[in-house]
Amino acid sequence: GPIALAQTNTRLLLTSGAGVPGHGGLTFGAFSDLSMNGNQDIVFLSSLRSPRNELRAVVRSTGVSFTVLAFQGLLAPTTRATYEAFSAPSMNDAGVVAFAATLSKDRDDAPTAIVVRQESLKTRVLASNLDPPPGVPGGKFEEFSAPLVTSDGNVLFGARWSGKSAGSGLFLWTPRG
């Protein structure tokens, strides 16, 4: 019956409570917002737990190896701001990852919301709440939806902006500008 089928076709990849590779003393919490590419690489949200606290994190899995791409409190790729929370991440077959993040800042001129694209070990901020949206003079991005990274490495995201002509729209970032 169905029980025997599940036992032969399904395998366990990772459990909450398992140790976090490269981060001694931390274990994985619950898993959410899973995304898998055509190579069966996975990117997802989890929490990293220690006896003292729990940190939100973006985690990537290639086969049986797990890598923490970003976590709460880690310095973001912007000026003097740290990661606070993350949108659902997205990943294409080439392994390019994109996610939106909210940030904690210790300076007024630091952003509080960003869209991130990670390729190999290069992390790039594509848009922040300090930027004017293209085609919206006098506007400023406010918040971002969970982005999608396309097969060619472009990043599609929704955003809301403020200003005289406040609104929301879809934006496409391309490496070629």
Image: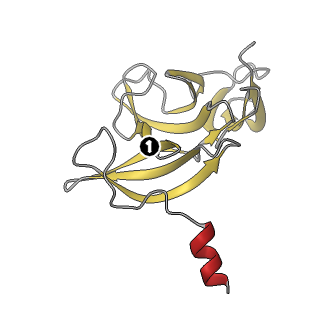
Residue indicated by mark 1: 66
Other-residue count near label 1 (Cα within 10 Å), few / some / many at <14 / 14–19 / ≥20: some
Q: Quadrant of the N terminus?
A: bottom right
Q: Position of residue 67 (x, y in %)?
A: 43, 39
Residue at 64% in and 43% down: 146
Of residues 116 and 60, the one drawn nearer to the viewer in this rendering: 60
Q: Position of residue 36 (x, y in %)?
A: 64, 47
**Displayed quadrant of residue 141:** top right
At mark 1, the secondary structure is strand
Q: Position of residue 124 (x, y in %)?
A: 55, 21
Q: Is residue 116 above or below residue 45?
A: above
Q: How is the image coloured?
A: secondary structure
Q: Position of residue 68 (x, y in %)?
A: 42, 39
Q: Is residue 59 left or right of residue 99?
A: left
Residue at 71% in and 43% down: 38
Of residues 157 and 50, the one drawn nearer to the viewer in this rendering: 50
Direction top: furthest residue: 176
Residue at 66% in and 33% down: 162
Q: Is residue 143 left or right of residue 136?
A: left
Q: Quadrant of the C terminus?
A: top right
Q: How many marks?
A: 1
Of residues 15 and 119, the one drawn nearer to the viewer in this rendering: 15
Q: Is residue 42 left or right of residue 81?
A: right
- Mark 1 belongs to which amino acid? Phe
Residue at 59% in and 47% down: 88
Q: Is residue 6 above or below residue 174?
A: below
Of residues 125 and 44, the one drawn nearer to the viewer in this rendering: 44
